[in-house]
Amino acid sequence: MGFLARARVKSPWILHYCTGGCNGCDIEILACLTPLYDVERFGMLNIGNPKHADVLMITGPGNWKNREVLQNLYAQTPDPKVVIAVGSCAATGGVFHNCDNILGGVDQMIPVDVYVRGCAARPEAIIDGVIMALQKLERKGSGGGRYAAGAR
Amino acid sequence: MQQVPVEADRDTVVGPEELVPAVERLVAAGTRLTTMVCLDVDPEFELIYLFQQSTLELVRLRVRIGKGQAVPSISSVLLGAALIENEIKEFFGVEFTDLALDFQCRMLMAAGSPKTPLLKITAESKFGGVE
Amino acid sequence: MARVTFPFGPQHPVLPEAIQLQLTCEDERVVEVLPVIGYMHRGIEKAAERNQYPHNVFLCERICGICSFIHALTYCELMEGMMRVEVPPRAKYLRTAWSELSRIHSHMLWLGLLADSFGFESLFMQCWRAREIILDILEMTTGQRVIQSSCTIGGVRWDIDTETAAEVRRRLDNFDRELQSVRPVFTSDYTVKARTVGKGILPREQAWSLGAVGPTLRGSGWAYDARTLGYAAYGELEFEPVVENGGDAYARMMVRLREVGQSVELVRQALDRMPAGELAVTVKRFPEGEGNIRVEQPRGELVEYARGNGTVRLERLKVRTPTFANIPTLLVMLPECEVADVPVITLSIDPCIACTER
């Protein structure tokens, strides 16, 4: 593993975006950053600029207006990147499955690497999901097989 | 004090043309708009205007209009009503005349979203009339 | 001076949710603002017509994850009122206790986000650390942290027994100590004052006519609190609406800060006076006719309107959330402010976009 790939896994930066969920998962993601759960011990940092991010954390089932915004954010994030869908509605639409403005999950808009279950997802589950995503990021970053940078 | 069941026959019913003067009178008396509710009661729309006094009392105004008929907007009297009227326009397709702020049906919905989702689905609206 | 229009959001570090403000600026001064919403719209009102009415409790709870308990309570009280179901007194007190706990956690969350919006990172962390005590209480009593699902039509699902109540009181004392340590920072710190005093002024008359609710209205000098309507057990508890007269971001912050203390007191009162008895009654009716209800959420007054037709599905459920009523006030607060103050002023109405757009 090269120096860059190793460094990336040691300090992944997170971009959080909500595509229309209920807010429960968003506040749990923020709770992860605060003293009790403190994901900064894994070198994670919540930032606002997609161009600095390695990990996209998406909550919410996705709707028509949000789709373009999210696809832009995904395109702006440099490779290698991983996408985490946080919460039940980000995976399938969940409790909002019969709402009419819903696309039914983040994977209807962009490719997703890790799904975190729970409605709302607990901070422990979110941290667990991020750790899983990092293993994937490591494989993508080390340039092997189908995880080569840029390839999907 | 909290009265959950609504006794509909005790509310004031006004016609579309008397709506704006009625709202102006209420506003002059110190009430303000809480919200508007639109109901699809075939073959009409029923609009309920909920007003609120500073003593927490509720006042209700009801307007009934036929489908395809326009309602005068009250956003010239109360700016806050513009958002609610835009929402009703998107959800039910009710036309408001003289909207202070018109989002052109793009306030909550995007281009791909379903149109007028809250209209009741009948055999006629779904299949274009049953012969 | 040339005017420049630029978008603030939908993806922005201060906003946990997606809303866009189109700001037209002259130099560093905002002259016009247009809120663009719809990034969080799901269509819950339609789904509420498709679902069976008891299942809507879970849907309503997820209108907003921060004040989820109060959304469930509102829907349940609305349905009970329409079906004329009498809820057992113990359930009413439990509902009051949980909704006040939700209010504390929402206000602490907001106080932290406000501190974060002007870059006071350590204060943000302190507020959220104190908030975790409340979330622990919620988890201990209902089994979930943010979405509790403890309210049901006809009563509540879980009980707080004497042992747990003692533990809740002990933790509330801990929380009180934490609150006392952050309170002086909010009331007298130079940075906090410099960023909030005189920012985003909402005059008393305009606050009323634009339809502001909750702390935004009370910060402009109106003693208007829907809890005085006496839903759940509020009619039997002692409290006074918190009012500040400044009308600026600082006044709204002080309203929320004082309400946290008030809510702690209300939880204690509710636990003390809770009568013994049943938790829920079985409801075997269907909602019929019309009903509307007003409930005080952390962000303001929540209005729900429903019409039933005697079947298991509702004909219409309309939810008017507090932020929807508060958004027009931004049109008054934001013009003439500096671009750097836009996050603070926007946050000062405590925007909950998931609520607004449903």
Image (spheres, coloured by chain):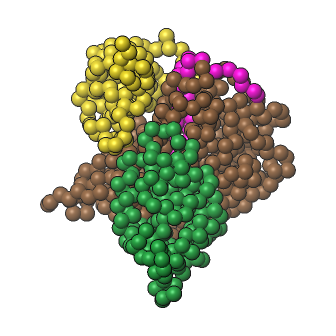
B124 shown above or below B76: above
Residue C97 percent across, percent down from the top left:
70, 43
Q: Depth check: C341 or A135 in front?
A: A135
At 46% from the left and 85% from the top, the residue drawn is A4
Chain depicted in yellow: B
Residue at far left of view: C1
Left or right of B102 on screen, residue C293: right
The image quarter in which residue C99 lies: top right
Q: How many tags in the picture? A: 0
Q: Is residue A99 above or below residue C106?
A: above
Asked if one can make out residue B25 in the rendered structure from this viewpoint, the answer is no
Q: Does the stretch in magenta take in B79? A: no
Chain C appears what colour?
A: brown
Q: Is residue C329 above or below residue B87?
A: below
**Residue B120 vs residue C305, the one in the foreground:** B120
* Residue C2, x across and y down, in percent: 14, 60
Q: What predominant SS class does the magenta segment belong to?
A: strand
The residue at the point 35 percent across, 54 percent down is A68
User: What residue appears at the point 64 percent right and 40 percent down from the top-left corner?
Assistant: C239
Residue drawn at x 85%, y 46% as measured from the top left: C162
- Quadrant of res C88: top right
Closer to the camera, C266 or A84? A84
In the rendering, at what x and y percent does residue C153 appear?
68, 31
The boundaries of the magenta stretch are C281-310
Say if the magenta span includes residue C293: yes
